[in-house]
Image: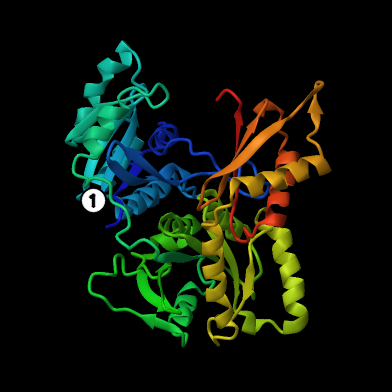
């Protein structure tokens, strides 16, 4: 069963992002501030007691140069389309505006459950305003303050009331789930078809295995896989085609459920900013990655090409320097056989567990080779390190003072770990703890 989805809808500046952050929690991002990667979040996964859900913040869907009402309309329609419950956020300090009424009109046609969150209610004066909002004509009104965390539990009680308890993927353990993501027209669907038509692949048509018409279970070299295609969903009307963020939303839902993400780039068009944006979400989610350069049949000089194009990809995706690149043509099936071995490999790398003694040998050698920089006469000391998680691998360092860690030294330690252990295609998370923590 797939996770239920909550959409946050409302005019600008009513505090959607603050409430979004409350619901999804500030997760520790793997890419903190990677240059060239935009950091607006419009999608996340949250939990409340035994309930797990997806959250969409429509405020992050930005249509510049569009008329305001058209923009709100498109955002609201996408959210309604995707959501099980809509949280309509209004500003308790300002009262009802014409724009709120415009949002209301769209939501009333949706037949979805709508909960009105009256935000910025943090004193008696604003508390008295809440009854004004009843004229919107919905059934549920909850006063909240996103910035002060007031009323959020009441809101979530109402929102999750009809959700099923924790639902996770209903695939057996050991099934490798991978998604095919990328901007529109890079050949995602053709790639999925090419993978499924390969000789060594056996597609299963078990009743009840398709969940969203985008999951296809199959067997490769006697092992179970599921490919999740983000392109296979029908778009309702033209409205979405103007929004690249919509394809991003689809991608993020698929990333969430996958072990491995194939980021597809169109060799014919080269790399654009949106490709990086999509890849950065997979990285932020801590997933194993493979970069797939598709439509390679359209490139003239193949031999010179791979070397040169690899350089170009490496320059553009500097934050994915450890990710393998596969060149293929989904249309002609040229080099398609090179893909599945990479998927298998990066999946195994994500689940690799290093023994503590060997890891510490590597760290001791690294520190001996280049000691940490000192700051105000103090130097970072690493007492010991251990791997505390997999998928993505997490290394916890016990140190004298985590305030002394410099990002360049962190990068150095990561490079040393990668030199000694095969984590190709997988982000590594570092955590530093003081001795007394």
- Residue appearing at x 36%, y 73% in the figure: 216
Compared across the picture, whether 53 is left or right of 305 comes to: left
- Secondary structure category for the residue under label 1: loop
- Residue appearing at x 64%, y 66% in the figure: 324
- Residue appearing at x 19%, y 33% in the figure: 140
Residue carrying label 1: 110
Q: Is residue 166 above or below residue 141?
A: below
Q: In this view, does 298 lie above or below 323?
A: below
Instruction: Using the image as rendered, state which of residue 6 and residue 243 is in the foreground.
Output: 6
| Residue 375, image x, y percentages | 79, 25
| Residue 72, image x, y percentages | 39, 46
Q: Is residue 301 visible?
A: no
Compared across the picture, whether 318 is left or right of 148 comes to: right
- Residue appearing at x 35%, y 17% in the figure: 122
Compared across the picture, whether 334 is left or right of 251 comes to: right
Q: Is residue 324 above or below residue 129?
A: below
- The image quadrant where one finds the N terminus is bottom left
Mark 1 closeness class: few <14, some 14–19, many ≥20 residues within 10 Å: some
| Residue 4, image x, y percentages | 29, 50
- The image quadrant where one finds the C terminus is top right
Q: Is residue 48 above or below residue 424?
A: above
């Amino acid at each position: 069963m797939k996770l239920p989805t909550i959409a946050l809808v409302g005019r600008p500046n009513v505090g959607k992002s603050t409430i979004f952050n409350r619901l999804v929690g500030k997760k520790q991002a793997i890419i903190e501030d990677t240059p060239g990667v935009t950091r607006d979040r419009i999608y996340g996964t949250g939990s409340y007691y035994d309930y797990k859900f997806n959250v969409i913040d429509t405020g992050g869907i930005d249509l510049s140069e569009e008329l305001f009402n058209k923009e709100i309309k498109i955002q609201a329609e996408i959210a309604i389309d995707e959501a099980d419950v809509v949280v309509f956020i209004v500003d308790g300090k300002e009262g009802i505006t014409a724009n709120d009424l415009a949002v209301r009109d769209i939501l009333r046609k949706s037949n979805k459950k709508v909960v009105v969150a009256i935000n910025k209610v943090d004193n008696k004066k604003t508390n008295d305003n809440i009854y004004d909002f009843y004229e919107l004509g919905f059934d549920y009104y909850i006063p909240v303050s996103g910035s002060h965390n007031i009323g959020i539990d009441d809101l979530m009680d109402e929102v999750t009331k009809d959700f099923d308890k924790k639902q996770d993927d209903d695939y057996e353990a050991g099934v490798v789930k991978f998604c095919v993501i990328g901007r529109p027209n890079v050949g995602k669907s053709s790639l999925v078809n090419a993978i499924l038509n390969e000789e060594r692949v056996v597609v299963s048509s078990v009743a009840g295995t398709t969940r969203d018409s985008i999951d296809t279970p199959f067997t490769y070299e006697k092992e179970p896989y599921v490919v999740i295609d983000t392109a296979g969903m029908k778009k309702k009307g033209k409205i979405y085609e103007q929004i690249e963020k919509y394809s991003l939303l689809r991608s993020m839902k698929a990333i969430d459920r996958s072990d491995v993400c194939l980021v597809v780039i169109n060799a014919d068009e080269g790399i654009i900013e949106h490709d990086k944006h999509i890849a950065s979400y997979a990285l932020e989610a801590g997933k194993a990655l493979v970069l797939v350069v598709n439509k390679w049949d359209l490139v003239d000089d193949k031999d010179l090409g791979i070397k040169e194009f690899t350089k170009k990809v490496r320059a553009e995706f500097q934050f994915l320097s450890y990710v393998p690149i596969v060149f293929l043509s989904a249309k002609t099936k040229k080099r398609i056989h090179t893909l599945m071995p990479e998927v298998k490999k990066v999946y195994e790398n994500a689940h690799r567990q290093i023994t503590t003694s060997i890891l510490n040998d590597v760290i001791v050698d690294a520190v001996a080779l280049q000691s940490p920089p000192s700051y105000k006469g103090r130097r970072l000391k690493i007492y010991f390190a251990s791997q505390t998680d997999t998928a993505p691998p997490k290394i916890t360092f016990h140190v004298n003072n985590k305030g002394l860690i410099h990002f360049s030294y962190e990068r150095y330690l990561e490079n040393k770990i990668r030199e000694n252990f095969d984590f190709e295609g997988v982000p590594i998370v570092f955590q530093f703890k003081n001795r007394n923590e």
